[in-house]
Image (cartoon, rainbow, N blue to C red):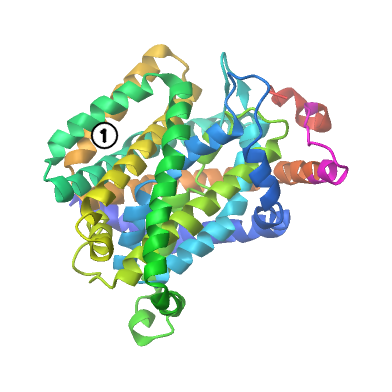
Amino acid sequence: MLSMVIDSISSFMYSKLLVIMLIGTGVYFTIRTKFPQVRLFRSACKAVMEKPDDEDAVSSFQALMVSTASRVGTGNIVGVSSAICIGGFGAVFWMWMLALLGSASAFIESTLAQLYKRKGKTSFYGGPAYYMKYGLGKGWMGILFAVLMIITFGFAYNSVQSNTICLAWQKAFGIEPATMGIALTVLTLLIIFGGIHRVAKFSSTVVPVMAVIYLLIAVGVVVWNITSLPKVLLTIVENAFGFNQAAGGVLGVTVIQGIKRGLFSNEAGEGSAPNAAAVATVSHPVKQGLIQALGVFTDTLVVCSCTAFIILVSGVDLTASNGIQLTQDALTHEIGNIGNPFVAVMIWLFAFSSIIGNYYYGETNVRYIRDSKLGVFVYRLAVAAMVMVGAVVSLDFAWSFADITMALLTLCNLVAIVLLSRQAVFLLKDYRQQKKEGKNPVFTKDKMPEIADKLEAW
């Protein structure tokens, strides 16, 4: 009965409300900012490699890796395969479209997070809860967002990540979910009790390695089946718009699944990445905005596409399995028996890095509500407990719960960034003007005197 209620709520939110909000704000921000995610692509790449003067500060690259650790996880492997199983090949196209439009939303939210970030003892901190409080002057909205963030990332998302790891390892190695759950819980506690610097170091080490390995395998599979690629791309487009009879009857499901799983994967507009973006030490807020927009591209247009192509070119039966096991079957079909354990190892790296990234997002918001050692300690134990719970609950329940909390979180954040978008657009103009003058863009709060008293870090 609980599952039925959750499914009904999820269907309503994704069939109407969230679809309109995500696409509408994505188009609005893209037009208003004149497509910075494409025009300033090179600037974003350069900004990633900038290092702060203080060696102990969190760099732009480390902040990107923390956000990417959360983005690049089960959404890229399980989310894609689930979207294809339920919504057909066309769901991949709508994931691409959401990433293209959503990167503008990611730019706005991360730029605002940098603008309103606060000074900590050893690093900066911030996120949507802070720009809601200091930018909009609505502390209650910040608390609401913080609570939703804690539930969504600390608990719901981490149960999905844990569930996926356990299913993959059970299929590949025969390890019982409960046993794997205990191991994951212990490892999670070891990392998260080290604070943001340990989280950043772990993410900046693991994420690039796992992404490169996965991409190399995916590219190899695509090249091996290069003659099938045009047909796969044509099928994706045909199904995306219901151009054939089979896809026409489920076009609505295709769009919804693409948007739902695209949001889970790239998190654009959701309000998660700004928590990591605020930590970085940069000379201008727009730099992190561009970097996080780049992260959306990397997540969906690269990593998610790799998973989709592996599944589609393999020709495996989409109805035979679901979730991570479909990807395992597809890769086994392409590279032999090593496919099963390879995906299991990769999903462990992807999902475990997401658990660590998700944890940090929740901690930032726990500190927003009440910055106490006891509160953070209890939260850490609760996260570990949810990792264990996720190992033993059903896949459908874990995903449905995450879908609802993700939708509520996203709606709350989208309202805030629409209301504050004027400030992000002003910052973008200032950034572009300085670049035109041949300068390394630098921002100081005297450029925005009307809100200077709210800008603690500038």
Q: Is 287 placed left or right of 70 in the picture?
A: right
Nearer to the camera, 57 or 256? 57
Q: Which residue is mark 1?
A: 387
Quadrant of the image occupied by residue 354: top left
What is the magenta range? 432-445
Residue 61: % across, % down: 57, 35
Q: Residue at x 35, y 76 (%)?
A: 250
Q: Is 202 placed left or right of 171 in the picture?
A: right
Q: Is 216 placed left or right of 445 in the picture?
A: left
Q: Is residue 245 magenta?
A: no
Residue reaching furthest to the right: 437
Q: Say whether residue 146 is visible.
A: yes
Residue 54: % across, % down: 65, 19
Q: Local crowd at mark 1 within 10 Å, few (<14), some, or many (≥20)?
A: many
Q: Residue at x 43, y 36 (%)?
A: 149
Residue 112: % across, % down: 65, 38
